[in-house]
Image (spheres, rainbow, N blue to C red):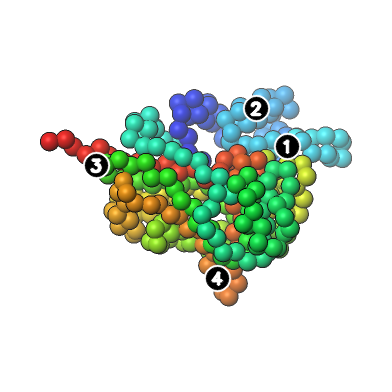
């Protein structure tokens, strides 16, 4: 799920979907997967020129991605959806007044325990050797753009900039994630647990380890038979419970965490065994996957009332 925050993003999004034809394009791609422009034009009964204009608007809004691929008649453009769910945040400007945001590199974990298959890489090369967990200790890890393991956990320290008297109201954490299968397998369920300061926030099941198409930001040297992209997920903890993409995963609230200005905030991502077989975890950062971001945390709070 992607959160639309700025007025410019929301305006582009609304313009792109203000057409029956473009809504049908999104419906077709969501139902049938990747399609080329000729197939879409023929299916909807519009000219190739008109289809190109529609695709450009959807692409500019970030709703679809367009790839150039070779076909029987030379190069062709194929389209696929970037996201299937969006959150339109109409209160972002007001939210920014009482919140702060930080982006944590995926390689800046504070603790880990991982088992092969595993590996870690920057945008230019593998760090060390694959399936050797010792390289998760490499100083180069802070530059990582992708990492993966079949079982274990990672821990990240979220910055706590709360001041005395400020009350935590919500924690939002977004990241691109998938399972970890030998090579890739889009049907490879993995149960991934999220905890904060030892409090279990809940478990989310990743459907697979995606490798059907090359990741939008994957470097040219990255092998096509390895993890290509993940799903962008939004983990949030509010006064009503814990949620993934707005779906409740537990009753754990921010009040249960008892975080104040002196507290640490330690996030753990851990692979749980499923039917005796862990499904692994792949985490994507900048220069990999379909989203050019690392782990983004937003901390929301209220100011104490002055007497």
Give the camera-side residue of 35 and 231.
231
> Residue 120: horizontal and vertical position, in percent?
66, 53
Label 1 or label 4, whichever comes before in sequence order: 1
Report the residue marked by disc 3: 165
Provide the secondary structure element on which disc 2 rests.
Answer: helix
* Residue 89 to residue 116: above or below: above
- Of residues 304 and 150, the one nearer the viewer is 304
Give the vertical position of 60 relative to 183 (above or below): above
Dot 2 and dot 4 residues touching (CB under 8 Å):
no
Asked whether residue 9 is in view, the answer is: yes
Badge 1 crowding class, 10 Å Cα cut-off, few under 14, some 14 to 19, many 20 or more, is some
Taking the spot 52% from the left edge, 58% from the top edge, the residue there is 111
Horizontally, is 67 left or right of 248 in the view? right
Q: Of residues 189 and 273, which is closer to you in this image?
A: 273
Q: Earlier along the polypeptide chain: callout 2 or callout 1?
A: 2
Q: Where does label 2 land, which residue? A: 56
Image location of residue 64, percent across then percent down: 62, 36
Q: Assign a secondary structure to mark 1.
A: strand
In the depicted structure, whether residue 273 falls above or below residue 154: below
Local secondary structure at mark 3: loop
Residue 176 appears in the rendering: no
Query: In the image, 240: left or right of 204?
Result: left
* Residue with the mark numbered 4: 273
> Which quadrant holds residue 74?
top right
Mark closest to the chain's N terminus, 2 or 4: 2
Q: Which mark is residue 67?
A: 1
């Amino acid at each position: 799920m992607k959160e639309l925050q700025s007025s410019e993003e929301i305006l582009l999004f609304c313009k792109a979907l203000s057409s029956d034809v473009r809504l049908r394009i999104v419906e077709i791609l969501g139902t049938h997967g990747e399609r080329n422009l000729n197939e879409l034009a023929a299916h909807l009964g519009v000219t190739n020129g008109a289809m190109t204009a529609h695709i450009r608007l959807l692409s500019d809004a970030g709703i679809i991605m367009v790839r150039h691929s070779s076909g029987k008649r030379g190069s062709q453009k194929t389209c696929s959806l970037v996201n299937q769910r969006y959150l339109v945040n109409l209160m972002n400007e007001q939210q920014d007044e009482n919140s702060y945001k930080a982006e944590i590199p995926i390689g800046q974990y504070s603790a880990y325990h991982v088992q092969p298959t595993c590996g870690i890489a920057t945008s230019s090369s593998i760090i060390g050797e694959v399936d050797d967990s010792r390289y998760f200790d490499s100083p180069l890890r802070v530059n990582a753009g992708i990492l993966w393991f079949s079982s274990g956990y990672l821990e990240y320290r979220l910055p706590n900039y709360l001041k005395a008297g400020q009350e935590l109201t919500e924690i939002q954490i977004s990241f691109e994630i998938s399972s970890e299968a030998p090579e890739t397998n889009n049907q490879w369920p993995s149960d991934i647990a999220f905890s904060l300061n030892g409090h279990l926030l809940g478990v989310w099941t990743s459907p697979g380890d995606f490798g059907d198409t090359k990741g939008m930001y994957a470097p040219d040297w990255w092998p096509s038979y390895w993890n290509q992209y993940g799903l962008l997920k939004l983990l949030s903890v509010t006064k009503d419970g814990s949620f993934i993409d707005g779906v409740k995963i537990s009753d754990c609230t921010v009040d249960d965490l008892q975080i104040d200005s002196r507290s640490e905030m330690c996030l753990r991502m851990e692979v749980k065994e499923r039917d005796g077989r862990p499904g692994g975890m792949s985490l994507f950062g900048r220069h990999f996957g379909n989203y050019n971001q690392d782990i983004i945390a937003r901390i929301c709070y209220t100011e104490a009332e002055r007497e």
